[in-house]
């Protein structure tokens, strides 16, 4: 390692010179500011700055000398500069050589100077001895290090059930869903451990070079939060399920809803099912019947022209055949083998093998996958992405696919459009009556008291309708802004999209005129464009 450049005073009766010693073997050059600050601190200010700067900065292998002031027979001893880092964890020392006849510093001198700077901890005497054995000037040494704190570990909770609401069902090698082995519902048995709290591991405080205590990062503590049907261990670090049911994690709180098992079909033998927990139907849900659950609903068979409503997920392993009357609603995800002639509404995502002549909406994505993976007929709405193998049919089946905003916003937007039309029609019916009445008053025609009261009522209703119209238009404006902001939405077709399909992204629509394959539709610069997959 090369030696840095440095400077040294040569004090004579005739005057004081500063010697600039060049660097060796790639060492660092001097900084003119460091030189001038040293000279001014010692009272030598008679130098020519340009001459001094040239001596410091111009490349040379020779020692240069510059006059800096009058001699006064006061010799300069070796000097150590001390810099303490802002966190007081490091002490940097920098040395300047003695002038001729000046004294060198000893280990005791260095320790004394450190003590005057309140440095008392972490002093590295080996580093000091190394410097004393091979003095290098204008070079930074670290002579003391504080002991940094040891951060502890935050408490954390280990869960023994699925906590990912966006987890997708497992797939077979051919891409189809194995509806017998679904992993999106976390079934637990009575006595099963649900979660374990791993407590904080305390850290250790540190100490700075001045002897001050240094605290580490404060560890974050946690506690197990849970609802009914759960037991907490004596040491409060484990929770267990009291019942066989379905476990879920909502905003950090563990819930276990017990399961109501229907051993066969939901039909005349069972009647409609209403349950606060989860419901499992081993057979089918027959036409005209309903299943309502605050938790999840699992149907092993088919849902016919029935009504299903769940506060969690709905899984229909053999599919939904609504016969144009069935309706399935879930606040979370819906997974089923197929959807035919039904209304299906999900607050999460929808995963299915095919959709035929149905109205289907999801707050997140709709993925139509599997061996066929087709959508034909009906209306499909998703907040983000619709992905299918085939959309439409060779027969030109009218199929609408909409993405770009949560379906609830889209539905409300359409409702408002109709409401605004109705409100405007009501205003137009009342307007001629009010205009005619004002004309009669201006002409000072006689008007009966009953007529005056009737018109006053109409005028009151007119103002109410105007206020309603303004509120409806304002709400519609805000919804329109939200719809326009959905720039990441897309429709992905891995196979073929046919004529007769209309794709809507936000507030823009495009009707497909010819077949396309392996296409992705996105919104760019105010229009819908097709891009290859």
Image (cartoon, helix red, strand yellow):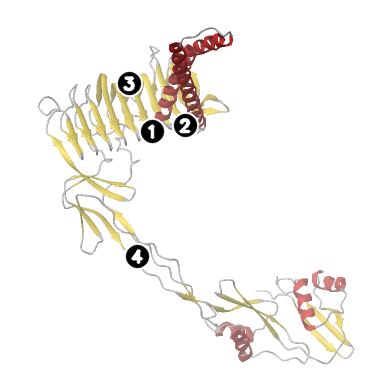
Tags 4 and 1 touching, CB below 8 Å: no
In space, the residues marked 2 and 4 are separated at their CA atoms by: 42 Å
Taking the image as shown, residue 347 lies to the left or right of residue 110, namely: left
Q: Which residue is mark 2?
A: 489
Q: Which structural element holds mark 2?
A: loop
Taking the image as shown, residue 306 lies to the left or right of residue 42, namely: left
Q: Which residue is mark 4?
A: 200
Q: Which residue is mark 1?
A: 363
User: Which numbered disc flags the more N-terminal residue, 2 or 4?
Assistant: 4
Tags 2 and 1 touching, CB below 8 Å: no
Q: Which structural element holds mark 3?
A: strand
Dot 3 alpha-carbon crowd within 10 angstroms: few under 14, some 14 to 19, many 20 or more: many
Dot 4 alpha-carbon crowd within 10 angstroms: few under 14, some 14 to 19, many 20 or more: some
In space, the residues marked 1 and 3 are separated at their CA atoms by: 17 Å
Vertical placement of residue 519 versus 219, above or below: above
User: Which numbered disc flags the more N-terminal residue, 3 or 4?
Assistant: 4
User: Which numbered disc flags the more N-terminal residue, 2 or 3?
Assistant: 3
In space, the residues marked 3 and 4 are separated at their CA atoms by: 52 Å
Q: Quadrant of residue 409?
A: top left
Taking the image as shown, residue 20 lies to the left or right of residue 332, namely: right
Q: Where is residue 119 shown, x and y percent of the image? A: 57, 82
Taking the image as shown, residue 123 lies to the left or right of residue 32, namely: left
User: Which numbered disc flags the more N-terminal residue, 4 or 1?
Assistant: 4
Q: Residue furthest right?
A: 14
* Residue plotted at (32% across, 21% down): 358
Q: Which residue is mark 3?
A: 358
Residue 171 seen from this side = yes
Tags 2 and 4 touching, CB below 8 Å: no
Q: Where is residue 465 shown, x and y percent of the image? A: 46, 21
């Amino acid at each position: 390692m090369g030696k840095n450049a440095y400077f040294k005073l040569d004090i004579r009766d005739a005057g004081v010179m500063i010697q600039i010693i060049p660097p060796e073997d790639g060492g660092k050059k001097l900084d003119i500011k460091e030189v001038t600050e040293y000279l001014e601190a010692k009272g030598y200010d008679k130098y020519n700055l340009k001459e001094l700067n040239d001596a410091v900065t111009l490349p040379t292998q020779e020692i240069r000398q510059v006059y800096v002031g009058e001699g006064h027979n006061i010799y300069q001893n070796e000097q150590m500069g001390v810099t303490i880092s802002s966190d007081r964890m490091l002490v940097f020392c920098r040395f300047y050589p003695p002038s001729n006849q000046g004294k060198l510093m000893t280990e005791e001198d260095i320790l004394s100077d450190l003590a005057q700077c309140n440095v008392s901890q972490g002093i590295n005497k080996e580093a000091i001895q190394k410097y004393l054995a091979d003095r290098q000037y204008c070079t930074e040494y670290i002579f003391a290090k504080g002991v940094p704190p040891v951060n502890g570990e935050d408490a954390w909770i280990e869960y023994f059930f699925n906590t990912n609401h966006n987890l997708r069902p497992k797939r077979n090698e051919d891409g189809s869903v194995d509806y017998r082995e679904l992993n999106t519902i976390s079934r637990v048995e009575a006595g099963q451990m649900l979660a374990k709290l791993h407590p904080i591991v305390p850290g250790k405080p540190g100490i700075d070079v001045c002897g001050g205590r240094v605290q580490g990062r404060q560890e974050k503590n946690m506690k197990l939060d849970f609802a009914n049907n759960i037991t907490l261990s004596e040491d409060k670090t484990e929770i267990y399920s009291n019942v066989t049911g379905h476990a879920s994690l909502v905003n950090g709180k563990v819930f276990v809803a017990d399961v109501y098992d229907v051993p066969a079909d939901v039909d005349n033998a069972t009647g409609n099912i209403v349950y606060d927990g989860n419901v499992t139907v081993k057979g089918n849900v027959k036409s005209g019947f309903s299943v309502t659950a605050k938790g999840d609903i699992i149907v092993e068979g088919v849902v016919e022209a029935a009504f299903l409503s769940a506060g969690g997920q709905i899984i229909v392993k053999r599919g939904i055949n609504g016969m144009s009357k069935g309706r399935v609603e879930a606040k979370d995800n819906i997974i089923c083998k197929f959807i035919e002639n039904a209304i299906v509404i999900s607050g999460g995502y929808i995963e299915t093998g095919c959709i035929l002549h149905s109205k289907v909406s999801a707050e997140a994505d709709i993925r139509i996958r599997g061996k066929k993976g087709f959508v034909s007929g009906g209306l499909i709405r998703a907040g983000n992405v619709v992905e299918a193998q085939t959309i439409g049919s060779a027969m030109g089946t009218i199929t609408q696919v909409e993405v770009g905003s949560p379906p609830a916003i889209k539905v409300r937007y359409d409702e408002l459009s109709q409401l605004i039309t109705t409100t405007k029609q009501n205003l137009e019916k009342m307007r001629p009556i009010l205009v005619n009445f004002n004309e009669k008053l201006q002409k000072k025609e006689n008007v009966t008291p009953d007529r005056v009261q009737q018109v006053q009522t109409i005028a009151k209703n007119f103002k109410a309708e105007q206020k309603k119209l303004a509120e409806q238009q304002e709400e519609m404006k805000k919804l329109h802004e939200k719809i326009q902001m959905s720039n990441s939405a897309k429709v992905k077709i891995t196979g073929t999209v046919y004529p007769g399909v209309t794709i809507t992204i936000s507030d823009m629509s495009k009707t497909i005129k010819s077949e396309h394959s392996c296409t992705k539709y996105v919104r760019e610069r105010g229009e819908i464009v097709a891009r290859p997959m």
